Every structure is written in C-alpha cells, then in structure tokens.
Image (tube, helix red, strand yellow):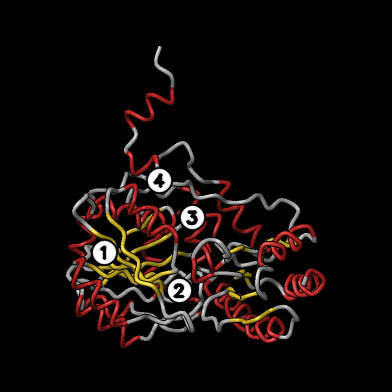
Amino acid sequence: MTDAGSLIRRLVRPAVQEMQAYHVPPASGLIKLDAMENPYVWPEALRGQWLELLRDAAINRYPDPQATELKAGLRRTQGVPEAAGLLLGNGSDELIQLLGMALGGEQRTVLSPGPSFAMYRLIAGFTGMGFVEVPLQAEDFSLDMPAMREAINRHQPAIIYLAYPNNPTGNAFDRGQIEEILDLAPGVVVVDEAYHAFCGESFIDQVPGRPQLLVMRTLSKMGLAGLRLGFLVANPQWIDELEKCRLPYNINVLTQLSVTFALNQDSLLREQSRQIRDDREGLAAALAQVPGVARVWPSRANFLTFRTVGGAAAKTHLGLRESGVLIKRLDGSHPMLRDCLRVTVGTPQENAAFLQALGRVL
C-alpha cells in the first residue's frame, strides 16, 4: 500500500514541495497591529442598516457573476477611468494568481524589487514562473534603477510588480522611475496600490494610455479586510483574457452586498483613512524617541517599519506579544530587514498601548 508521502513526492511538483506555506499567527486576545488592518468599526446605526440589508440576501442563489452593481460602485468611488476594464478578485492575492495562470510557465519570469510583498514570489512559484528580485537601496529602500534596467534587459520579465507604496518598507517609489520602467518593460507592469488610501497618489488615470500598465488595489486596508475584495484596472483586452482564468462566482453574494453598501458610505471610509494618516505621523515621531529604536523609516502606508538596536528584534517581538500586543517581525524574512519590525497604525489607544509596552520591553 502506497503511503501519502510517496504519493506526494511523486505527484506534487518539486517547486511546490520546496515552498513554505504562508503562515498567519493567531491573534486572539491581543491588540492586533500586525496585518495593516483599519482598526475602526462602523457606528452602531450603520451596522444595523448593513445587517438589515443582509437579512434579505438570497444565499440560496448564486451571486451575480459579473458583480454589476459592485463594479459600478467601484468606478464611482475609486476613480476607475471609463475607458478601462475592471476585474474583481477574492482579495488581491487571487488577482496575482490569475495573472500567474494567464502569463505563467517555466520560460516566463516575474520581476520585483525587494524586499516587497511576499505573494509575488510565492504565487510565481506555484504558477510555474521564475522569480527575480532586484534589491532596493539599503539606505532608504528606493529603487536601484541601474540594477532594474539591467535585470529587465537580461530577464525580459512577463510581469513586473511594483508595490506603490511598498510593503513592508512603507515608501512610495519615485514616479518618474516607475514611468521609466513602464517604458522599458517587455511585458506588463502591475502597480500594486494596496495602500492608495494613505498615499495620496495613483497611476490609475494612466491606464487608458498605457496598455502595459495594470493597476491593482484592495479594499482590505480601508476597513473591509474581512470581505476579501481586490480589483484590477487595465485595458479591456487584458481583462477579457484574464476573465478566462477567473472561476465563476468568485465574489460571493455577501461580499457583493456588503462592499456595495460600504462604498455608499465612502465619506466614512475616507475619514477613517485620514485619521490613520494623521495618527501615523504622531506614532512615527513617538516611536523614534523610544530608547532602543535605532531607526524609523518614513511611510506613505498605514504602517511603520522600524529597526531595533542590534539583535533585539526577536526579543522585542516576543516581549510585546507577552504584553498583549502583536506586531510583525520582519527580522529573518529578508537580509535587508535585519533587526526590523513593522507596526500597523491602530487607534490612539492601541498606539499608546504599543508604545508603552515597547518602552518596557526595550
């Protein structure tokens, strides 16, 4: 009788066997500042209206396969050009997977500066693509343009991912350099604007004039992380091809109803984002004054990346967790992130609790 291990070794692609699954630590009972979520809940009256809407949801029926009303809401509130196509995904992760499925293969390459979003590399691996990382400048995490030019010329990537702002470093790359990459790219350039609500700049208006440009966003950082909705804006011909890889009904009826409702409260979502931006600046200033914090990098996102004094990151991360505060340990994930940690901007009370606990731990 064949055991499971033998079957796996024989049937699962070697590239997949060599990968590590993406691990999300448990956070029950902790102040959760590790995942770049909006910390604010809706007012009670608004939650009542939302629940009343869901009461009549036809969960016995399949959802609208094209999510027509939801797409209209996104176009109205997210600045999607009328001439651009729109593709929805179960979070931006699914959109990255669809791109890998459509453009993938062993002779194809994904290129990204690094450190950056881990899913670019992970999904390239299980869709059969090679992955090339071009290191960022160590001092300020800016693009190394001579290295980017050389890598694009050598590897001829099918997909280039540029997170704008970048996760986990928080900075927004120079716009002129991104435009140069768009001109040089032999394939598509995906500008990942997951943190657009906190940045104030976007490339979405350039989509109609640049057929190689795809702009990707998620609503997770704006307070809708539990609904898992991402969207891709691109030339309609690109959307037609990617739709062939999208499974039908990938956006469920509860998500369609809930996000459409939330987009009608766009002013609330924007006000919460503004509050987070303001609190980010105060948290950065306070964090820089904590003894044992060696550096805090400027951020255009809803998080801050900081470096502890040599060798203290692991101890600090554990000490914060034991104090009831969960942040992200970056140390050990990438050579350029040695001794680094990342904290999401929370409510003023959560930020104060984090700073107090950090002061005790360091």
Viewer-side label of 4, 2: 2
Image vertical order of residue 4 relative to residue 158, above or below: above
Q: Alpha-carbon neighbours of circle 3 within 10 Å: few (<14), some, or many (≥20)?
A: some
Secondary structure beneath dot 4 equals: loop
The kind of residue on which mark 2 rests is: Asn
| Upstream in sequence: badge 3 or badge 2 | 2
Image vertical order of residue 11 relative to residue 40, above or below: above
Circles 1, 4 touching at the beta carbon (< 8 Å): no
Q: Residue at x 25, y 52 (%)?
A: 243
Q: Residue at x 38, y 57 (%)?
A: 121
Viewer-side label of 3, 2: 2
Residue 6: quarter of image: top left
**Residue 73 placement (x, y as % from top left):** 41, 66
Q: Give 229 or 4, whichever is nearer the viewer.
A: 4
Viewer-side label of 1, 4: 1
- In the picture, the quarter occupied by the N terminus is top left
Q: Which residue is labeled 3 in the image? A: 228
Q: Alpha-carbon neighbours of circle 1 within 10 Å: few (<14), some, or many (≥20)?
A: many
The numbered mark at residue 63 is 4
The numbered mark at residue 354 is none
**Residue 149 placement (x, y as % from top left):** 24, 78
* Distance CA(mark 4)–CA(mark 2): 34 Å
Q: Which residue is labeled 1 in the image? A: 159
* Distance CA(mark 3)–CA(mark 4): 15 Å
| Upstream in sequence: badge 3 or badge 4 | 4
* Distance CA(mark 1)–CA(mark 2): 17 Å
